[in-house]
């Protein structure tokens, strides 16, 4: 058990960090900042933090066709597209609801893995997928589940991010990082994300410059979100490589639970009985869809 303690601590770290991202995103958009401007600065700050880590370790970026392809796919499916839908959705939905919806990533990942021939069908996992769909329905259908019934229209948009996270997870599981370690891969991905988002932010008038604005809660939330995203992403990739992707996927439980707690404590959000029932169904579905975690052996970790 003692030799597995580092993996458990990293798992907890990732879950606690990502659990706060919904609340930080809610605060970041509270003053009118829009998605493309926020995303550019998040990418830039992440690249600076990860770049500093590379310098301290005496390493540089790996620029090859394979590394660029890997980083580009991760940037698009794991950050750019989910980021755009996240900042739009969190403007309209409570942060706690966003935390529940993020737990749908493994539920969406399962049918994608089936279609790619990377997983096998089983009755329990189909039941888990059904429970997850029922959980989303409990949020979307009852009139008393959301503070404003008009929020229902935002839920499909909020689910676009988990859909692309699921695509990213299957892509990473079936490919190599092009000779990069986790920090190099995430740093290159952040740089590519900034390059992609900057022209769009400038051309659409959504560019922001928090450096010249009075620093208040939104600006601090942006910096905290960027740092947390960068460090947690590196930790997650390290965990997936050393303890296995199945074990790393258990972060979904912690993200959902801590996200609800952060939303209640920091933002004062409260939820109806429908939402709590949806949470139970989503977590039950997640437990059935995700295979039982197995920590990697020392031999497997060295591969």
Image (cartoon, rainbow, N blue to C red):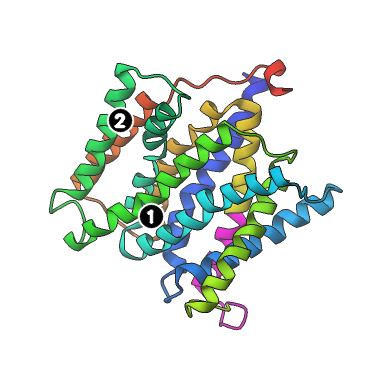
Residue 123 on the magenta span: no
Binning the other alpha carbons within 10 Å of mark 1 as few (below 14), some (14 to 19) or many (20 upward) gives many
Q: Which residue is mark 1?
A: 263
State the SS at label 1.
helix
Regarding residue 149, the answer to whether it shows in the image is: yes
| Relative image position of residue 111 (x, y in whole percent) | 37, 31
Q: Is residue 183 visible?
A: no
Judged left or right of residue 183, residue 292 is left
Q: Is residue 51 above or below residue 126?
A: below
Q: Nearer the viewer, residue 279 or 296?
A: 296
Whether residue 226 is in magenta: the answer is yes
> Residue at image x 20%, y 49%?
140
Extreme front residue here? 65
| Majority secondary structure in the magenta region | helix
Question: What is the crowding at mark 2: few (fewer than 14 residues within 10 Å), some, or many (at least 20)?
Answer: many
Instruction: Tell me: residue 53, above or below residue 221.
Output: above
Q: How many marks?
A: 2
Please name the residue shown 43% across and 58% down the image.
23
Residue 228: x and y in percent read 58, 53
Q: Nearer the viewer, residue 15 or 117?
A: 117
The residue where tag 2 is placed is: 129
Q: Relative to 234, say whether 205 is above or below.
A: below
- Read off the magenta span: 210-228
User: In percent of the image, x 38 and y 64: which residue is there?
Assistant: 88
Q: Where residue 246 sits in the image (x, y, percent)?
A: 51, 27
Give the residue displayed 41% in from the left and 40% down from the top.
105
Q: Nearer the viewer, residue 31 or 50?
A: 50
Distance, label 2 to label 1, CA atoms, is: 26 Å
Q: Which residue is nearer to you in this view: 249 or 216?
A: 249
Front disc: 2 or 1: 2
């Amino acid at each position: 058990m003692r030799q597995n303690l580092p993996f458990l601590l990293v798992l907890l770290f990732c879950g606690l960090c990502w659990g706060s991202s919904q609340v930080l995103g809610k605060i970041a958009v509270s003053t009118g900042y829009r998605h493309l401007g926020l995303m550019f600065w998040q990418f830039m700050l992440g690249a600076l933090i990860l770049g500093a880590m590379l310098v301290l370790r005496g390493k540089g970026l790996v620029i090859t066709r394979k590394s660029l392809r890997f980083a580009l796919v991760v940037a698009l499916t794991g950050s750019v597209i989910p980021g755009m839908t996240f900042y739009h959705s969190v403007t309209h939905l409570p942060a706690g609801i966003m935390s529940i919806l993020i737990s749908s990533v493994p539920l969406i990942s399962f049918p994608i893995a089936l279609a790619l021939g990377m997983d096998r069908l089983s009755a329990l996992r189909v039941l888990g997928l059904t429970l997850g769909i029922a959980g989303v329905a409990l949020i979307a259908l009852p009139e008393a589940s959301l503070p404003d019934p008009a929020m229902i229209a935002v839920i499909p948009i909020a689910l676009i991010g988990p859909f692309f996270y699921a695509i990213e997870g299957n892509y990473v599981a079936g490919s190599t990082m092009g000779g990069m370690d986790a920090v190099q891969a995430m740093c290159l991905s952040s740089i590519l994300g900034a390059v992609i988002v900057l022209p769009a932010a400038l051309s659409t008038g959504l560019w922001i410059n928090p450096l010249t604005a009075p620093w208040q809660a939104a600006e601090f939330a942006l910096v905290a979100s960027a740092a947390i995203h960068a460090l947690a992403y590196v930790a997650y990739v390290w965990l997936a490589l050393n303890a296995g992707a199945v074990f790393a996927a258990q972060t979904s439980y912690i993200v959902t639970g801590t996200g609800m707690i952060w939303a209640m404590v920091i933002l004062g959000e409260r939820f109806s009985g429908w939402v709590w029932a949806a949470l139970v169904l989503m977590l039950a579905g997640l437990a059935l869809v995700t295979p039982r975690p197995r920590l990697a052996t020392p031999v497997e970790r060295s591969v």
